[in-house]
Image (cartoon, rainbow, N blue to C red):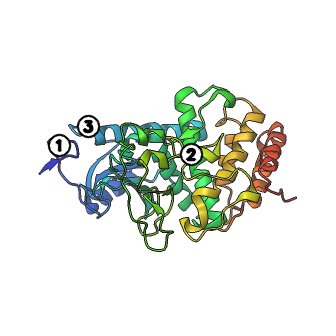
Amino acid sequence: MTLVTHAGHALQATPVSGSLLTAKRKSKERFGIAFGEFEIYDAANDKKIPGTFRADEESFRPTNDIQIDVLYHWLRKIHTFFLNAFSFKFFDGKGNSIQVSIHYGVKCMNAYWKNGTVVLGDGDSFGLYDFWTADDIIAHEITHGIIAHTSGLKNRDETGALNEHLADVFAIFYKQYQQSRDSDAATSTWIVGEKLFVGSQLDRPKPTPAPAGFPKNISYIIHGNENSPSGCYVVTDPNRPFSQHWHKPHLRNFEEPGTSNPPQPYHWSDRKTVAYDRGGVHQNSGIPNFAFYRAAIEARGPAWSGVGQVWFRAMLDPNLDADCTFNMFAALTLQHAAEFDTKLIEPICKGWSKVGVALKS
């Protein structure tokens, strides 16, 4: 069959049915060969996911669709990062494949994890767009998948903010690892999601109505499940250029959470209690984000290889409950610091103390 890609190119592709994929998996398992770690699908601007199968890491060949080719490149890099940095085969540690669906919906300004699939919209040039370009955001969503298949952290209120924090943390680990894996935390990047702003026409006013249940001056919901709109909202004024609704051209800033979109608190005493955003999960995640940043700066060295190893072990700890709170997770980080490297205990304590999270004895 002929597919017309998002970029306007035509190419020949043969859809692979679910039954054939299952047969392929069983055949390989019978001979003790690990099945592929990811599969790429094209939703073709529809809302049915995952869409048409395009490739996995074995069957992939370069195509005329730059989005598919770049997405494949990012997935290989993210998979290699988790394998090399943490000896972990996503998304469950056993190498079972993860689905990634590109071109979801029409101008869908969103990226999210849903039912075993990373869903990527094309976005809108008036706001954030081309989610397939943002490898750190893809790493963020894949981490949500890892969480879903390990601890199953809930995605509301304080626990949901912890869930978002962990996804942010492994996105920044991935990014720092790619840019310079040996760099000290103090000289590393601490920003996530700036690629989504490249080339977008944010200087044009474009008021958008708020979803049901949100304050009337809230619009442009992005980065969250469409069935439960939440995430990177902005407070809009139709009389102002849209660019002025963003603090800075990035989604997250560990070093300065207040410049994130939405603005995030630094300290537990400033946490948000709101009826939208699933209780403020994309706002309050700034508290543990800043705690991690301070711990990494105190510890020195690359964040992913020091404090990051502690966070990885805590994230996969079988005692990490689905209702885990900030202070419960903080206690796990101290426990794993004691096992991994006792020199990290003091920096981690300072990090949590800096944001007002009480440490359980």
- Disc 3, SS: loop
Q: Residue furthest right?
A: 361
The disc placed on residue 8 is 1
Q: CA distance from mark 2 to mark 3?
A: 34 Å
Specify whether residue 179 is in view.
yes
Mark 2, mark 3: which one is toward the viewer?
2
Secondary structure at badge 2 equals strand
Q: Which residue is mark 3?
A: 61
Is residue 81 found left or right of 133 in the rendered image?
Answer: right
Which residue, given by chain and number where applicable, does mark 2 sit on? Answer: 252
* Amino acid type, label 1: Gly
Is 155 or 33 nearer to us in this picture? 155
Residue 149 visible somewhere in the drawing: no
Characterize the local packing of mark 3: few (<14), some (14-19) or many (20 or more) Cα atoms within 10 angstroms: few
Tell me how many marks there are: 3
Amino acid type assigned to the residue bearing label 3 in the image: Arg
Disc on the earlier residue, 2 or 3: 3
Q: Residue at x 54, y 45 (%)?
A: 247
Mark 2 surroundings: few (<14), some (14-19) or many (≥20) residues within 10 A? many
Q: Closer to the N terminus: mark 3 or mark 1?
A: 1
Q: Quadrant of residue 226?
A: bottom left
Q: Amino acid under label 2? A: Arg
